[in-house]
Amino acid sequence: MMQNAIHIDDLSYHHDGAETPAISQVSLNVGAGERVALLGPSGAGKTTLLTLLDGRLRDWQGRVSVLGVPFQPSRALPLARRTDTGFIFQEFALVERSTVVRNVLNGRLGRMPGWRALLGTSSREDIEIARSALADCGIADLADRRVDSLSGGQRQRVAIARCLAQDPQLILADEPVSNLDPARAAEILTLLTRAAQARGATTVFSSHQPELARRFADRVIGMRNGRIVFDVPARDLTEDATSALYDDTDQTPGVRLKVVV
Amino acid sequence: MRARDQGGFWVGALIAAVVLWSLITTEVELSRLLSAGPRIADFLGRMFPPDPTIMEEIWKGSAETLRIAILGTVGAVILSIPLGILASDTMVSPTLHRPVRTLLAFIRAIPLLLVAMLMVGAVGLGPLPGIIAVAFHATGMLAKFYAEAIDGVGRAPIAALESAGAGPMLRLRHAIWPQMAPVVARDTIFRFELNLRESLILGIVGAGGIGFYIQTYVRSFQYDKAASVTIAVVMMVIAIEAINVAIRRRTS
């Protein structure tokens, strides 16, 4: 039996002061090495689910364990436990005024000895890892450039390099390409999924574009209003299933507007 | 409309009452007010021409004022780093940063000259009480600025480092500091300029610097020398302003 990278049982989460739950009664297993796409409109709970799996949320209900580590519902995951899970943000989340290589080295901080991390004197090994992550992302030549001089596609490559330098077993990517044009989006997802596969890492990325989900994942999970609507192998993803995610007729019965021409 | 007119009337009446109260209780003698003109003219006459022979004292006093401002600013920066961190919403919980912010507001509320007088009483005459007073007084503002600089940076890189397992100090060092550095530089230069300006008069209460000579010459009725020092102070203030404008132009 394949070991689970992610195990979720009856998970629910409310944002502070929100009326409806961001996630309600989600149960899910993701096997080690799988490539999973979370598909759904904004507000479906994709970001919340990924942030929770990254160990940054607390006060949820249910059972969650990631890479064999059970999470405590009452508190965020201890920092020392977060190094094995890498996270890629929609808006890149880079330090704009720092160089590319500094940003990539930031991914190593959790694995460096405390004093070395604080002083920012990276070891030769750390720098080697950062450089090879940059090479894997095709931007070795940008190492000494400042991030604020880069394009969007280049920035997301830096963010992926930072994640790879962290040497993660699980990569969570929150809408990693929705800020990029279609050609750049396909490039970045190719890069990300190849790098993850080469390292044997499990990947979960969210998207609101069905064609990207179908093309870059083995398995597609449809989410809507905090619930899992479907969970299918990517090749079985149908038009009907995806259009049901974005169709808003059943959400508010009786108030659908009639368009008068 | 009518309520508004009435409000205007009461505000006017209150202002009139306050001015009247000040006039009556200060016992301004009209005769003195009338003779003040010639007296001031006489006083200004005695300041002229300014005595140019005290250049040495002016240089000495100016250099000491500069040293007080430099060391006072260094002291304020050293105090403001930990206090700025403790006053920031990003780094500590409200239960800690609220009392620290209140403390900083209290420090800001105490005038520099008052702190300097107290410090002269505590450590004696000379530049040392001036340096301590400037460091203390400037910390109230600088620590607040540093805290605001910490809280003003982009949050996303902080979350990214947290996700990678970096603790609060590492996030401060590698995600917050690179973003806030230009703000810190600008605020510190601004505070140094204020420190230099404010320490020009510290000598009046015996806390060192060029202000000492103003006090000495006025008390001994050497108004021509006092005039020279006053001109030197005005020129220094203009020079500080000019340098600051040049720095701002270069960094903006």
Image: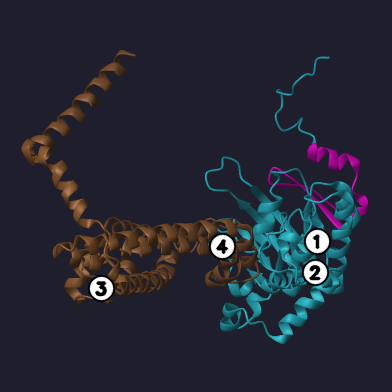
B178 and A195: which is toward the camera: B178
Q: Distance between the residues labelled 2 and 3?
A: 52 Å
Q: How far apart are marks 2 and 4 (CA)?
A: 24 Å
Q: Which mark lies nearer to you, 1 or 2? A: 2
- Which chain is cyan in the picture? A
Q: Position of residue A8 (x, y in %)?
A: 69, 60
Q: What element carries label 1?
A: helix
Q: Name the quadrant of the N terminus of chain A.
A: bottom right
Asked if residue B66 lies in the magenta stretch, the reply is no
CB-based contact (under 8 Å), mark 1 and mark 2: yes
Q: How crowded is mark 2: few (under 14 residues within 10 Å), some or many (20 or more)?
A: some
Q: Mark 3 points at which residue?
A: B129
Q: What element carries label 3?
A: helix
Q: Mark 1 points at which residue?
A: A154
Visible residue check, residue B89? no
Q: What is the quadrant of residue B246 in the picture? A: bottom right
The answer to whether marks 2 and 3 sit on the same chain is no
Q: Where is residue B72 in the image (x, y as percent from the top left)?
A: 36, 71
Q: Name the residue under label 4.
A: B182
The answer to whether marks 2 and 4 sit on the same chain is no
Residue shown at 60% from the left, 41% from the top: A20
Q: Which mark lies nearer to you, 3 or 1? A: 3
Q: Name the residue under label 2.
A: A142
Q: Distance between the residues labelled 3 and 1?
A: 55 Å
Q: Is mark 4 on a helix, strand or loop?
A: helix
Q: Which mark lies nearer to you, 2 or 3? A: 3
Q: Position of residue A177 (x, y in %)?
A: 80, 54
- Which chain is brown in the picture? B
